[in-house]
Image (cartoon, helix red, strand yellow):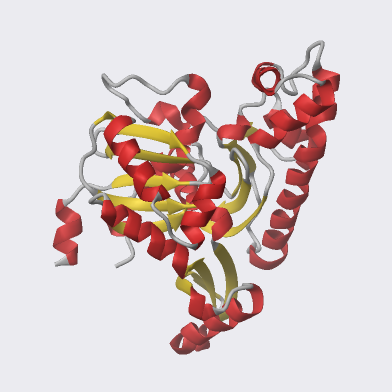
Amino acid sequence: MNKLFYKDKPIIGLDVSSTDMKVMSIDLGRRLVTGYGVIDLDPLQVRKAFDEGSNYIINSLKTLLEQKLVGTLASEHVVLGIPTSRTFSRTFTVPASTEPTLKDAVALEVGQYIPIPISLLYVDYEIIERSNGTLTVIMSAVPRKLVDNMLAACEGVGLSVAMIEPSINAVARVLKATEEAYLPTVIVDIGATNTDIAVLDGSVRITGGLATGGNTFTLDIAKKMGVTLENAHQLKVLSGLAPGPKQAKLSSALKPSLHSILTETRKVIRYYNERLSNNNGRLEQILVVGSGSNVPGIGDFFTNELVMPSRVASPWQALDFGELPQPAKQFRSRYISVAGLANVKKGEMWQ
């Protein structure tokens, strides 16, 4: 019954972060966006809804679907993206002989590396590689309360959740299809308040992150240069790190936060190189995405600091909005994760 159900029903993407909620519907055969929308959220209210439960998410969902939707949605069946920062993902290797007891090995990893009792988590895992008598396993865990509260909110507005995944996995799906991310790639997803970092090598192998994002950049500029937040935002997106009369001051303002992101990126790269890379594996590129990536010169900054080709990804050329008005250029980067959710093929779903 489930296979017939998923075969016959189109899937839409729904992405919920700490600062906004986005929905998108794509006709995958034609790569045509049939509907999309976004609504801003209050981070404190979102945290309460995730951890304790409240009507905030369901009320925001209703507003998004009834008032903020551009176009139409193909169905009520969704792939749900949740904040990567609220999930725990880890890749590890075990001898192939332990496959019959792999569940116990996963439980051991959870107990050692995740600061939440396994009884309070939903845990899933998958073997992603078999070689030289070893298994490479990716494990993901997410607090039960968060998942249960999100499922209840979706059901409350008539949506049926077919699959849940961290938002960075959805970003990776888009980049693999549009940005040559079939190469071993470091993804730096700079959101409004958080930055998620991942290594994509066939699949997402490791993730990391920190509470620094595009809003942090704006605050840094406002404080350093003594300007309003509105003016600081304009300076960030119009001048940023690019050559110009304000480059020195803006670079001075932005670099402390950018160096925090670099430090976390280096940790993720080091873990991959030491634990997960095979003999032929070598990271080829850095792709910077997210609403906080709209800083001119940020690609060159990562290239110079990490000595690796880096660029801001622009996957929009792969999507056709048809007769729908497209999001304004400065807001398009917000939709990368939800586009990835809407691009889930039915065969990818966990059965």
Residue at 66%, 63% in the rendered image: 279
Q: Is residue 145 above or below residue 250?
A: below
Quarter of the image holding residue 61?
top left
Left or right of 111, for residue 76: left
Q: Which quadrant holds the C terminus?
A: bottom left
Left or right of 339, for residue 270: right
Q: Which quadrant holds the N terminus?
A: bottom left
Residue at 14%, 52% in the rendered image: 8
Residue at 78%, 16% in the rendered image: 243
Outermost residue toward the top in this view = 245
Left or right of 172, for residue 325: left
Q: Is residue 109 visible?
A: yes
Q: Is residue 143 above or below residue 33?
A: below
98 and 228: which one is in front?
A: 228
153 and 103: which one is in front?
A: 153
Q: Is residue 237 above or below residue 262?
A: above
Q: Position of residue 123 (x, y in %)?
A: 47, 73
Left or right of 260, for residue 16: left
Q: Is residue 342 visible?
A: no
Q: Position of residue 20 (x, y in %)?
A: 48, 40
Q: Position of residue 324 (x, y in %)?
A: 29, 21
